[in-house]
């Protein structure tokens, strides 16, 4: 059973940066995708970014492209989301999630993710 634990959220001023971490344990396959999602109060959940384990392929939503960077550290079984130039519109609970594949494949943000972390709050405010 894959377990995901997010950390790194907090309060930051507009224009600031935060790095979220997603520590994973219990892998059952070498092929998987990890995604970052966020949900603000009263809004639908939004897929922000994902990364593929096989080749490091990455995807970014238009709303974060050029400001957020997803990366993975296989030795630590951790995926990071570096968030720069944050705005109040980035305020949300951020979740990491994962799904396994049978073969190497590019990650897809608009698909069913089977495993979810508990979320970490990011608040951008002056």
Image (cartoon, rainbow, N blue to C red):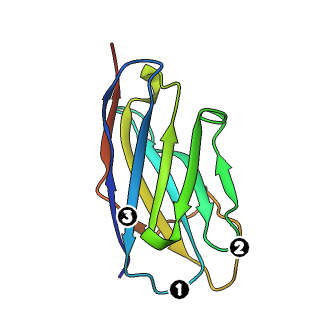
Mark 2 nearby-residue class (10 Å; few <14, some 14–19, many ≥20): some
Identify the secondary structure beneath mark 1.
loop
* Gap between marks 1 and 3 measured at Cα: 16 Å
Identify the secondary structure beneath mark 2.
loop
Q: Nearer the viewer, residue 42 or 105?
A: 105
Q: Nearer the viewer, residue 67 or 37?
A: 67
- The first of marks 2 and 1 along the sequence is 1
Q: Which residue is mark 2?
A: 105
Q: Is residue 98 above or below residue 95?
A: below
Quarter of the rendering occupied by the C terminus: top left
In the picture, measured across the screen, residue 79 lies left or right of residue 106, that is: left
Quarter of the rendering occupied by the N terminus: bottom left
Disc 1 + disc 3, Cβ < 8 Å:
no
Disc 3 + disc 2, Cβ < 8 Å:
no
Residue name at image x 65 percent, y 64 percent = 107
* Residue 29, disc: 1
Mark 1 nearby-residue class (10 Å; few <14, some 14–19, many ≥20): few
Q: Is residue 74 above or below residue 5?
A: below
* Gap between marks 3 and 2 measured at Cα: 21 Å
Q: Position of residue 112 (x, y in %)?
A: 53, 65
Mark 3 nearby-residue class (10 Å; few <14, some 14–19, many ≥20): some
Q: Position of residue 50 (x, y in %)?
A: 58, 56
Q: Position of residue 52 (x, y in %)?
A: 63, 66
Q: Is residue 61 above or below residue 117?
A: above
Residue at the farthest top position: 126
């Amino acid at each position: 059973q894959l377990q995901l634990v997010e950390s790194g959220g907090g309060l930051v001023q507009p224009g600031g940066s935060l790095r979220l971490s997603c520590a994973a344990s219990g892998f059952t396959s070498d092929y998987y995708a990890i995604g970052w999602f966020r949900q603000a109060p009263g809004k639908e959940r939004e897929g922000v970014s994902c990364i593929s384990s096989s080749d490091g392929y990455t995807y970014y939503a238009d709303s974060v492209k050029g400001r957020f960077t997803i990366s993975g550290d296989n030795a630590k079984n951790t995926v990071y989301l570096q968030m720069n130039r944050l705005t109040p519109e980035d305020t949300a609970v951020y979740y990491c999630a994962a799904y396994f594949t049978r073969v190497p494949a590019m990650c897809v943000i608009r698909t069913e993710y089977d495993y979810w972390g508990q979320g970490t709050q990011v608040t951008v405010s002056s």
